[in-house]
Amino acid sequence: MINISRLMCGIQYYGDTLRYSNTSANQKNGTSKGFGPVVVWNITRTCNLKCKHCYSDSDNIRYENELTTKQAFSLIEELANFNVPVILFSGGEPLLRPDFFELINYAIKMNIRVTVSTNGTLITPEIASDLQKAGVSYVGISIDGIGENNDRFRGKKGAFDAALKGIQYCREKQQKVGLRFTINKHNYKEIEDIFKLIEEEHIPRACFYHLVYSGRGSKMIDEDISHEETRNILDKIIDYTKFSYSKGTYKEILTVDNHADGVYTYLKLLNNDPDQAEKALALLKLNGGNRSGIAISQIDWQGNVHPDQFTQNYLLGNVTRESFSDIWSNSKHPVLNGLRNRKILLKGRCSHCKWLNICNGNFRTRGEAYHGDFWAPDPACYLTDQEIGIN
């Protein structure tokens, strides 16, 4: 994640303590010294929607061999013992798992920060209240367009209205909530309408995701936006962040899954605010860029461990057969070890980029999906050859 609010305006939020620690960039298997990775835990594959970009290729059916409640409790204990700072409960749709509240309550009891990624359509006033009472730190609700456009993308009529109600219910119950928006060919022209929605609904946080070609999203390579369009979107996100700050509303605005955004934001600052640019560059160096397989891990519904949620084609181990700490600390898997020492493996323009220390090769899944090579350049890098120093 790139915290545009922090880079542009200097506002610090909780997640920044994990992103910009003095010990972040040098870690090989955690967020910072003494901590394990953030874990994205897809507790179920079942989902009531069928989104075009779903990395878990979920559907509204029951999938076999999901972890039992007992196994899930044991896993939470393991993660606590490994000092995992955050579990992101995801799916499928996590609220469809019958023991959802048992799991989040147990994780919070074990002093792990809990966040939830949901499509929001199942959130009622009662569920919003229960989330707040449990101590959930943050609920991210996905909206990928306005009205019918969102519904087409997410595969169900009425999904937009239901998700919006989910946001409103969380706000009413004082549960911290934010909006998640995946940028693609079908919705990028609605970005300003999304800003308007954020303002009207007083949404305090928004994450703008770049498309990753994984799961059903692997069929969307041709539905990604162009480099020029991406730059235009980033300009609008940056402008909205500055506008929000000037009003004193202090929205937390982040972009996700494209570390070229950090470089682009720094270069924009360098032209307009050199002092803030140097502060931003120092933060980006602390972060060290993409940290899949280092500061972020995924555990799927069957207990399989992966470098992140988009690399489910690479299995590192299974928590029903060995501990998460052993899998994450001692794995001899070539992809995991490669991710932790990736600079010497990267190919093409990534290998020669002068920003490698603050981007770290960007997203490997997109490189593999586009080129058929895990270490090939990320096709979503929109920085010019001149900007990365190879012209």
Image (spheres, rainbow, N blue to C red):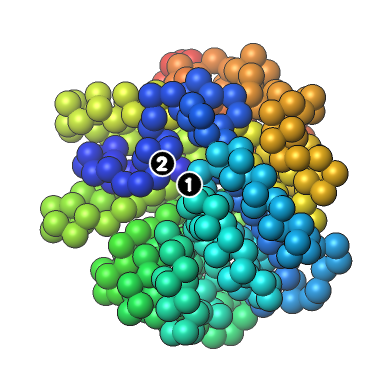
Location of residue 10 with respect to 361 vertically, above or below: below
Q: Calculate the distance from the C-alpha at mark 2 to the C-alpha at mark 1.
A: 6 Å
Image check: 250 left or right of 357?
left
Q: Of the residues shown, which amino acid type is indicated by label 1?
A: Val
Q: Which residue is mark 1?
A: 256
Image spot of residue 378 (x, y percent): 60, 34
Mark 2 secondary-structure assignment:
strand
Location of residue 344 with respect to 223 vertically, above or below: above
Cβ–Cβ below 8 Å for labels 2 and 1? yes
Residue 94, picture quadrant? bottom right
Image spot of residue 264 (x, y percent): 37, 34
Note whether residue 380 is visible. no
Q: Of the residues shown, which amino acid type is indicated by label 2?
A: Ile
Image check: 312 left or right of 294?
right
| Residue in the image at 56% along x and 32% along y | 30
Q: Which residue is mark 2?
A: 2
Name the residue nearer the viewer: 159 or 224. Answer: 159
Location of residue 127 with respect to 391 vertically, above or below: below
